[in-house]
Amino acid sequence: MKRNNSENDWNNLIPLFTQDNKPGSTTEAIFELVTNGVSTKMDEWFFDFNENTLLEKVSFLIDWFNNQKNKGDVSERKIPMTDFAASKIKFTTELEDKFQKRSELKLIS
């Protein structure tokens, strides 16, 4: 009876990455750096296959943000994002900081 057993010596292959691998180290791996990449938490707003749809989404987000930030109390106290962002838009820390500082968002195309 013939079995489909392959004999691979996986331990002799170079790993894709190792947790110990740091830039400049002598540990052998295909990739030197392990990262989660860009994490916007807002991919649905900033990625689209259609350029016009993308511009519409980004323009809507900017207009909504600028409109909401101007509705708040103009005193120095912080305004909770939950008062304005009714779970429609996920705010990053950077966007929340811009909101608290009442920064104006602009679309540069």
Image (cartoon, helix red, strand yellow):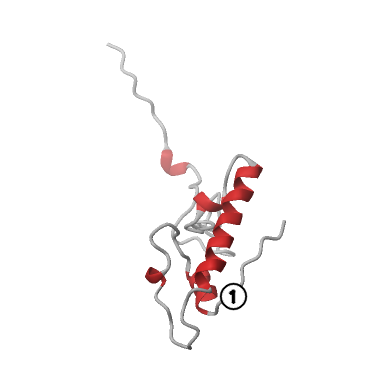
Task: In this rendered view, identify the residue nearer to me: 32 or 54.
Answer: 54
- Which residue is farthest top? 1
The answer to whether residue 6 is above or below residue 21 is above
The residue shown at (49%, 73%) is: 71
The residue shown at (31%, 13%) is: 2
Task: In this rendered view, identify the residue nearer to me: 65 or 38.
Answer: 65
Q: Quadrant of residue 89?
A: bottom left
The residue shown at (59%, 54%) is: 58
> Percent from the top left, x then y, of residue 63?
58, 61
Disc 1 target residue? 103
> Percent from the top left, x then y, of residue 70?
53, 74
The answer to whether residue 16 is above or below residue 22 is above
Query: Counting other residues with Cα less than 10 Å from the Cα at mark 1, is it few (<14), some (14-19), or many (20 or more)?
Result: some
Task: In this rendered view, identify the residue nearer to me: 26 or 16.
Answer: 16
> Percent from the top left, x then y, of residue 73?
46, 81
Whether residue 4 sits left or right of residue 103 in the image: it is left
In the rendered image, the quadrant that contains the C terminus is bottom right
- Which residue is farthest left? 1
